[in-house]
Amino acid sequence: MTRRLWKLEQILVGLNEHQESEANEVTVEKDFFTDDYIRLIKNSHMIPHTDKSLQAQDWQKELSMLINDPEQLLSMLGLDRSLLDNALLANRDFQLRVTPSYASRIKKGDSNDPLLRQVLPIGAELNKVTGFTADPLAEKHASPRKGIIHKYRGRVLLVAATQCAINCRYCFRRHFPYTEHQVNRDQWDEALDYIRRDASIHEVILSGGDPLALADKQLSWLVEKVAAIAHVRRLRIHTRMPIVLPARVTPSLLQVLTDTRLKPVMVIHCNHAQEVDEQVEEAINRLRNANIATLNQSVLLKGVNDTSETLVQLSERLFEIGVIPYYLHLLDRVAGAAHFEVSENHAKNIYQQMMQSLSGYLVPKLVREKANALCKVPVFLYDEVRL
Ligand code: SF4
C-alpha cells in the first residue's frame, strides 16, 4: 500500500493569521480507508473523555483524513465506477468532502443510500434549472460588515468559519463567496462593533461554514468577545459536527461553550435516522450532560428523506438521544441542487402524515426561507388538511 504523509488540512481559516492553529502539526497516513481504518475511527471515540489532549488530536486527525476524492469514496463503498465520470465533473464545482466516520455509516454497494446522496457529486448538479441561483436567499444584500449576515431582528449571524467537515450537495451556501468573508482581527473588531452598536441584538449565531471547524482557542476568543457585549444574551451554534464528526464534541469544547455568561444553544443538522450511530449518541450525551440545549433542523430532500415514515423515524430517533426536532426546511433553490427539490404540495402531504403519526412536540416546524423576509416563513396547511 502506498503510504503518504499528509499535513493536517488548514481548515481553521475563519479567524486571522495571527491566531495559531492548534492542529497544523498533526500528520497522518492517507490510503487507509479500509475496514481496519473504519474500525480505528470508531474505536478512537472510545478514548476516555477525561483525556483532553487525546480528544483534541482525535477530531483533528479525523479532519486531516477527510475524503475528497470521488474515486476513493466509490472504491471504499464498493460502488460502480460508471458513476465516476459525472462525479468528477460535478466535483469541480463543489468538491466532495466527507468525514470517514460519516462515510462509515453509508451502506456499502448501495448507490441510493440516503447518506451517500447527500455527499456524492452527481451529473444532475450540472443541469441549469430556472429559478435555481447562486445566492437564493440574497445574503449578499444582508451583509452590513465582512463576516456578518443580519437578516432578522434581534439576532445576527457571524460567518465564524469558512469551511465544513462535510460538503452537503444541497447546501444553500455552496456558492457562497467565503474568501470575501475571511476576516482578520481588525475586521472582527468592526463586525463586533456592529453588534455593540445595536442594542436590539440579543442573540449571536455562529455559522459558516461550520463554526466548530474552528480550533477551541479560536472559538474561545470569539465567544469571549461576544460575551463582552452586554446586550447579547444567547449564543447559538449552527453545526453539523456532532453528526458528521462526533469526536469534535470534546471536554474542552464544552468548556468553551459553558465558561461564558451567554446561554448556549446548539442547532445540529441531521436529515436521516441512519446518520445517528453510537458515536453521535455519545456526543449528544456529552452536550446534554453539559446542559447545552440541542435542537435539530433538517432539509426535506428528494431521495433522502421525502417520506413521512423516514421523517417520523428521524424525529423519534432524535428525541431518543435527547434532541428536539426544530425545523424541517423546504430546499433553498440553490444552483446545482434542483434534483433534491420536493414540491410544496408533496411536502404538505408528507407533513400532514407526520402530524397524524407523531406527538406535537416531535413535529418540527415546516418552513421555507425567503430572500428579504423578516423571519422564516411557515408553510401552512390550513384548508388542505383533512385531519
Ligand atoms: S455542513 Fe451546513 S454549511 Fe456545511 S456544507 Fe453542509 S449544509 Fe452547508
Image (cartoon, helix red, strand yellow):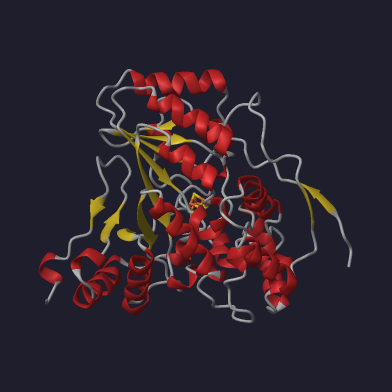
Image quadrant where one finds the C terminus: bottom left
Q: Is residue 218 above or below residue 52?
A: above
112 vs 349, left or right, is right
Q: Is residue 318 above or below residue 267?
A: below
Q: Which sits in the foreground, 99 or 250?
A: 250
Whether residue 159 is visible: yes
Q: Residue at x 67, y 30 (%)?
A: 20
Counting from the top left corner in percent of width and height, residue 27 is at 79, 48
361 vs 72, left or right, is left
Counting from the top left corner in percent of width and height, residue 174 is at 53, 49
Q: Which sits in the foreground, 245 or 321?
A: 321
Q: Which sits in the foreground, 87 or 104?
A: 104
Counting from the top left corner in percent of width and height, residue 77 is at 67, 75
Whether residue 147 is visible: no
Which quadrant of the structure image shows residue 11?
Answer: top right
Q: Residue at x 70, y 77 (%)?
A: 82
